[in-house]
Amino acid sequence: MNEHDIHTKIQQLIATEHKLRTEAQSGDVDPDTEKAQLASLEHALDQCWDLLRQRRARIDAGKNPDAATANSVDRVEGYLQ
């Protein structure tokens, strides 16, 4: 996935998140479904941001950014802030 594809995916995930929140506020989605779907979206966003950071770090190090791979949700969520 190149940088443009990652940004596109991030934009899609954010749009889906906004739509879900709007539907939840209007009562079209029950709170449990909203919570589960939001968690899934947040995990996917975290993976995309992580992949983007990896690509940029590889570029800064003079390495091939296309060799960056997506980390698992467990690994990404386990990072210290």
Image (cartoon, rainbow, N blue to C red):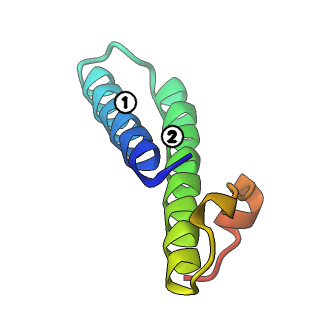
Query: Among all residues in the image, which is located at the extreme bottom?
Result: 61
Q: Position of residue 23 (x, y in %)?
A: 30, 21
Q: Mark 1 — residue?
A: 16
Q: Mark 2 — residue?
A: 41
Label 2, residues with CA under 10 Å away: few <14, some 14-19, many ≥20: some
Tell me which label, 2 or 1, sits earlier in the chain.
1
Q: Position of residue 58 (x, y in %)?
A: 58, 76
Residue 27: image quadrant is top left
Task: Assess whether mark 1 and mark 2 are in contact (beta carbons under 8 angstroms).
Answer: yes
Residue type, label 2:
Leu
In the image, taking residue 1 as reference, residue 3 lies left or right, namely left
Q: CA distance from mark 2 to mark 1?
A: 8 Å
Q: Position of residue 2 (x, y in %)?
A: 50, 50
Q: Residue at x 37, y 34 (%)?
A: 12
Q: Position of residue 67 (x, y in %)?
A: 69, 62
Q: Nearer the viewer, residue 11 or 55?
A: 55
Q: Secondary structure at mark 1?
A: helix
Q: Nearer the viewer, residue 15 or 30?
A: 15
